[in-house]
Structure formats: C-alpha cells, structure tokens
C-alpha cells in the first residue's frame, strides 16, 4: 500500500485524496491554511469532470449547491441597461454543466475524505529529499512513497523540487481581483457587468450569498509588488480602474474594506514534465489554465481521477501524463482566447460586442453565435476518454 503526501487541500488535493483512498493508499494532506478554505468565487464543473463527480457519488450534492444564477446584464457607464443574457450562456455552460462556489465544492470534497485521510492544517513542506523524506514547518519529518504538489498556481512543491515560478508561470497580459462586497445593487442570482477599453468590472450574487462578489479584470504589463501587501495591491487595482464609471468608484471603496481580497496575474503554468522522482504535480500547480479558461476546476478533478487510477493501475506518472497531456493542451488554449472576450481592448470592439449582445435574441443565426461562444469550451471539456480503473 502506498503512503502518499498531498500538499494542498483544495479541489485537486481533496479529489486526489478520495481516489487514492479508494485505490487503497494511505493519504496525508498538508494545507497551509488553518482550515479548508470556504467562500471564494464561482467555478464551473463541465464535461468529463461531471462524470468524475458522478463516480464520486457527489452529483446530487453538487447540483443542490449550484449557484442558481439567472441572468447577466451589461450596463453602460451611466448605468443604463445595454443587454441582458441568460447566465448559462454568459458563463459558457451547456447541458448538465454546474456552476458552484469554489468553497462549497471544496467543503463537499473535504467532507468525503476527512475521516479516511489525515489532514495537517496550518503547515507546509519545507524540503523533500530524493528518498522521500519530507520536512515540514511544524510537523516532525516523515518519509513518503510519493509526494503530490496540488498547491495551486504558485505551488510550493513545484518551487522546492522543480525550480522558480518564472520558469513555468506564463502571464497572459491581464490581472484579476475578486473580493466580497455588500450587495448594494440588490442583485438576486444575477451578474452586472460594465466594460471599458481594457478593463472589465463584474459584480454578482449567487443563491447562497447575502453579499456580492466584485470581480475586476484588466489588461496590464507585469506589475511588481509584494504578494503579502494587500494594501498596495488594492492601490494597484484602484490605479488600473481609475476613470472607469458606472458603479466602479463605489465598488472600489467597498473593496478597500474587504478582508478576502484576491489579486493575481491571469497566468498559465506550462511544464515539459509534471513529475520528478517521487514527486508529481496536479491541478493548477502542474497545468493552470487561468481563470479565463473556465476549466481549471474541471482539469483538477479529472487530473486527480486519472493520476490515482494510473498510479494504482501501474501506468505511474508517465501514464498520467500520457492520458492528460492532450486534454490539458486543448483546455489551456481556451485561456488566451477567452480573456480577449472578457476584457475588450478598444472602444470600437467594445461597441461592436455590446451591439451583438443586444441583437443576439433577434438574430436569425443566433444558434451559430451561441455555438461559437459555448462550443469551444464544451468540446474542450469532453476532450478525454476516461478509463475505468479497477479498485
Ligand atoms: C478569480 C478566479 C476565478 C476563477 N474562476 C474559475 C471558473 O469560473 N471556472 C473554473 O473552472 N475555474 C476557475 N478558477 C480556477 C480554479 O479556482 C482553479 O483552477 C482550481 O481551484 C484549481 O484547483 P487546485 O486545487 O489545483 O489549486 P487551488 O485551488 O489554487 O488550491 C491550492 C491549495 O494549496 C494550498 N497551498 C498553497 N500553498 C501551500 C503550501 N505551501 N503548503 C500547503 N498548502 C498550500 C492553498 O491554500 C490551496 O488550498 C478561477 C480562479 C480564480 C483565481
């Protein structure tokens, strides 16, 4: 029976803990945060990932916790309604695809594994030796057969074992920020969007939320700042959004008070190999597709299923890479394309997009337009044939 350490108790780490336990492994999960991280933003589960969620017996629970979003409305700078569209179309969802708060999904996955796996919260790996000896910030050193880095785009395990972020993290030329703010717009399961050239603001409130989330995305050269200095990051956001009208000044004021402020570049992770010796990377740590792809969560869920199955079935890390590479490639391709649709560069292109959105319900070939918006992501979401790994 393999003794496995997973770094990171988010979507990838908890999903992997589940599948490794089903294959008879002993699992320890180390998570830097003091508890499983709830809250956060909404994410999508599509295609093959939904199939995996079904195989985990979580489909009903996930569907029951879906965000229930109804519509997305674009507003102009004076707050006039420009176009309203169905929330699923806006989010690129089709068929049974589910949108859920990331924290809700994380909680469901954690509950499924908390009694079978050992969780070490508030700790972090400090070193990994070739023979599997791992040292921690707090816990005593221990030896593992396998160490999995499922600790996100800025993975600690990747930095320790493979090298600095700069070798693997590729910026797409945009930044993203998201925070919880009071629902002063009175949103009820709806998104409100305002776009200016190179800058987009989006506020939404889901079925579960009394408050709202304010999400900003903007085109930018690489910014240099201290990752722990949220005050400075809030300044950078305010500078980026300076001059944008609609509700943006009030939202920026609310963001100043937010204690769950998130700020990062919109980036992807590209690596020639996801494993080295006893160490394997999973999810955003190995192949972050960026929030703009809308597929990061699904890649993490599918990757966990495949990694556990290949390890148990004898394919090992090489089998995991073989099964996942093409799936990752097509899903990562979505990132740079989608982000250009989310943050429009010029006033003319913006005018054209809003006009299209307004006319969409009346267009004779509207199915074709919809297919162009949702088709690419749907094709990518099913671009893997899942094996049945025996347990
Ligand atoms: C603003 C935003 C919007 C997004 N929207 C979508 C969307 O609509 N659809 C979608 O599919 N995806 C979306 N994503 C992406 C999605 O959240 C990720 O792709 C997904 O969560 C990947 O999961 P992961 O487990 O690999 O990494 P993460 O969720 O990043 O989790 C990494 C975990 O590792 C932990 N960790 C970090 N460092 C250490 C350490 N040193 N030691 C131990 N633990 C550590 C972290 O605390 C965290 O729990 C979005 C992301 C962002 C930021």
Image (spheres, rainbow, N blue to C red):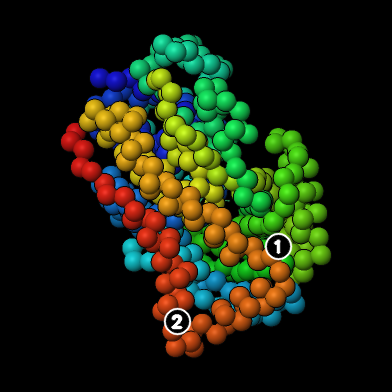
Mark 1 CB lies closer than 8 A to ligand 1: no
Q: Quadrant of the C terminus?
A: top left
- The local secondary structure at tag 1 comes to loop
Residue wearing tag 1: 198
Residue 293, percent from left and from top: 50, 54
Residue 122 visible in the picture: no
Residue 15, percent from left and from top: 37, 39
- The label shown at residue 321 is none
The front one of 54 and 224 is 224
Residue wearing tag 2: 366
Which quarter of the picture shows residue 106?
A: top left
Q: Residues within 10 Å of mark 1 (few under 14, many from 20)?
A: many
Give the residue displayed 31% in from the left and 50% down from the top: 384
**Is 176 positioned to the left or the right of 270 in the image?**
right
Give the residue displayed 44% in from the left and 88% down from the top: 364
The front one of 32 and 151 is 151
């Amino acid at each position: 029976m393999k003794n496995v350490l997973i770094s990171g108790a988010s979507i990838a780490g908890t999903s992997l803990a589940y599948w490794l336990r089903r294959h008879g492994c002993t699992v320890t999960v180390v998570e830097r945060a003091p508890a499983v991280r709830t809250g956060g933003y909404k994410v999508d589960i599509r295609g093959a990932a939904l199939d995996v969620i079904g195989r985990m017996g979580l489909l009903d629970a996930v569907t029951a916790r879906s965000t229930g979003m109804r519509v997305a409305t674009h507003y102009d700078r004076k707050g006039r309604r420009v176009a309203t569209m169905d929330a699923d179309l806006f989010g690129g969802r089709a068929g049974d695809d589910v949108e859920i708060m990331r924290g809700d999904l994380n909680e469901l996955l954690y509950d499924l594994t908390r009694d079978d796996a050992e969780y070490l919260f508030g700790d972090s790996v400090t070193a990994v030796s070739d023979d599997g000896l791992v040292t921690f910030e707090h816990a005593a050193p221990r030896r593992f057969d396998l160490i999995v880095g499922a600790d996100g785009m800025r993975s600690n395990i990747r930095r320790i074992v493979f090298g600095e972020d700069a070798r693997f993290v590729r910026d797409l030329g945009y930044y993203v920020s998201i925070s919880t703010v009071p629902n002063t717009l009175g949103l009820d399961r709806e998104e409100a969007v305002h776009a200016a050239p190179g800058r987009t603001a989006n506020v939404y409130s889901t079925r579960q939320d009394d408050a709202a989330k304010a999400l900003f995305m903007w085109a930018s050269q690489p910014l240099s700042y201290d990752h722990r200095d949220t005050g400075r990051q809030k300044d950078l956001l305010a500078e980026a959004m300076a001059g944008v009208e609609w509700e943006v000044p009030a939202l920026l004021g609310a963001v100043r008070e937010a204690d769950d402020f998130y700020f990062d570049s919109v980036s992807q992770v590209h690596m020639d190999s996801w494993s080295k010796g006893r160490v394997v990377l999973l999810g955003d740590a190995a192949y972050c597709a960026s929030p703009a792809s809308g597929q990061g969560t699904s890649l993490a869920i599918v990757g966990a299923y495949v990694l556990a199955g290949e390890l148990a079935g004898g394919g090992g890390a090489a089998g995991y890479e073989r099964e996942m590479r093409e799936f990752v490639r097509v899903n990562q391709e979505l990132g740079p394309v989608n982000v250009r649709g989310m943050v429009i560069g010029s006033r003319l292109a913006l005018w054209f997009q809003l006009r299209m959105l307004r006319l969409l319900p009346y267009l004779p070939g509207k199915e074709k337009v919809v297919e162009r918006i949702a088709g690419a992501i749907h094709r990518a979401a099913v671009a893997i044939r899942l094996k049945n790994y025996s347990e």
